[in-house]
Each structure stands twice: as structure tokens, then as C-alpha cells.
Image: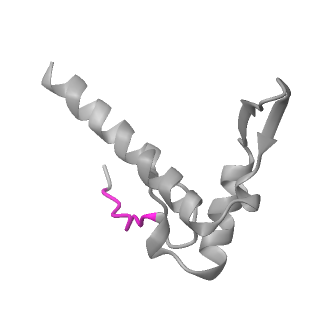
Amino acid sequence: MRKIIIEAYQYHELHGMAKQNVVRWLDEDPVEYENEEGRKVREYFSDMDEGMIEEHCESNGYLFDRFGDPVHHIEKEIEKKEKEEKL
């Protein structure tokens, strides 16, 4: 077995193109809600300000590599395997 070390960053620690990659990834799953008129609305992260994107990523525990690709799922998979091994 090989061990691979990945440096993970929060959204606010990224810069330039990496942040753009995060926004592209987030836009694949826009926020959907019903407005006051009862109509379904889709809101894309590319239309949100930086603070809202940062808050969304932080509240969901999203982590990224230096290119802005999501890596938080790797951490969750490792935690799951470690939990299973203890049983």
C-alpha cells in the first residue's frame, strides 16, 4: 500500500484560477428554492459574491487541492474506513 499526502485548502485560502474552478464545480449543483411568488428559482454560485461562496464552502466542510478540485470526500472516506476497522 502506498500513502499519498494531499494538502487541502479551504476556499478562502485559494487564489485566482483555483477559486474559479471551485465556482465551476459548485455551479454544477445550483441552489434551488421557491421565491415569494411561488416560482422555483435556481441560483448559481457564479452569480454570488465571494463571501457567500466562502460561507457555503465552510459550512459544508468543503476542502480543495491547490487547483480548486474538491478533496473533502477523501477525508470522509478515510474516516469511514477507520471507523469500520475499529468494529
Residue at 81 percent across and 36 percent down: it is 41
Q: Is residue 40 left or right of residue 81?
A: right
Identify the main secondary structure in magenta.
loop
Residue 48 location, quadrant: bottom right
The stretch in magenta equals 3-10
- x, y percent for residue 29: 71, 41
Residue at 21 percent across and 28 percent down: it is 83
The correct choice, above or below, for 52 with respect to 73 in the image is below
Residue at 60 percent across and 68 percent down: it is 50
Is residue 63 visible in this depiction of the protein? yes
Nearer to the camera, 85 or 67:
67
Nearer to the camera, 4 or 75:
75
Residue at 30 percent across and 49 percent down: it is 1
Q: Is residue 18 left or right of residue 6?
A: right
Residue 79 location, quadrant: top left
Residue found at the far top of this picture? 87
The correct choice, above or below, for 37 with respect to 69 in the image is above
- x, y percent for residue 85: 19, 26
Residue found at the far left of this picture? 86
Q: Is residue 82 left or right of residue 60?
A: left
Residue found at the far bottom of this picture? 16
Q: Is residue 14 magenta?
A: no
- x, y percent for residue 84: 24, 23
The correct choice, above or below, for 35 with respect to 71 in the image is above
- x, y percent for residue 63: 44, 57
Is residue 61 visible in this depiction of the protein? no
